[in-house]
Each structure stands twice: as structure tokens, then as C-alpha cells.
Image (cartoon, rainbow, N blue to C red):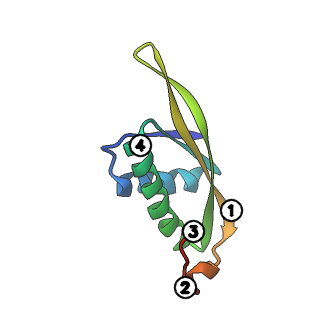
Amino acid sequence: METLKVSSKSNPNSVAGAIAGALGKESTVEIQAIGAGAVNQAVKAIAVARRFINENGKDIGMIPGFVEIEIGGEKRTGVSMKIFVTGPFQKEKSDQQTSSNV
């Protein structure tokens, strides 16, 4: 499984391309991000990657979790997102209905 590390300065479109490319070769790819800015960029990248994958008639799913990463001898807690292809793309019902605030 390929692991992509995302920072707050990562370009979501570039990361999305890397996600789609990795999912073309393997069944799962992991994204790791430390900090709110990095997690934000990672989530945007997953949304863009989903569009890329949908064009091929497939859809993706994600399992979030935590990961400990050692940086400069110091352990940091980050967010891990495992992304996988789920099957044929189906238009979501929420796209057809009016959304409500929760």
C-alpha cells in the first residue's frame, strides 16, 4: 500500500492525481497528515480524486484513523486516511434533494 504524506502547503489537485494513480495500481492508498491545514488539504484532495475516479465509473471510500509519526526524534499524532475503490459509481440521493443543516 502506497503512503502519501500531505502538508498544509500540498496542492490538492496534485495529491488527487497521486491518489487516483495509486488506486489504478493498488486497491488501497493511505494518506497521512499532521495538523489542521494538512488535514484540510488532504480532504480536499480526496474530494477531487473522487471526481477523477467517478469518470471511470467507480467510487471510493475512506477509513479515517490516527497514526503516530516520528519527526526529528519526536513522536507526533497525525490523521491517517485509507482510501479504497468501493465499486460502481452511483449518484447520491443528496444530490437530488435539498440539503438541510444539521
Report which residue position mark 3 lands on. 102
Question: In the picture, residue 24 is in which quadrant?
Answer: bottom right
Mark 2 vs mark 3: in front: 3
Query: Is residue 32 found left or right of 9 in the rendered image?
Result: right
Residue 42 location (% of width, % of height): 45, 49
Q: Nearer the viewer, mark 4 or mark 1?
A: 4
Residue lying at the far front in this picture: please name it. Answer: 102
Earlier-in-chain disc, 3 versus 4: 4
In three-dimensional space, the C-alpha distance between marks 2 and 1, rounded to whole angstroms, equals 26 Å
The residue sitting at the left extreme is 9
User: Residue at left 59%, top 36%?
Assistant: 66
Amino acid bearing label 3: Val
Above or below residue 88? Residue 26 is: above
Q: Nearer the viewer, mark 2 or mark 1?
A: 2
Tell me how far mark 4 sits from mark 1, CA to CA: 27 Å
Q: Residue beneath label 4, please?
A: 36
Q: Which residue is mark 2?
A: 98
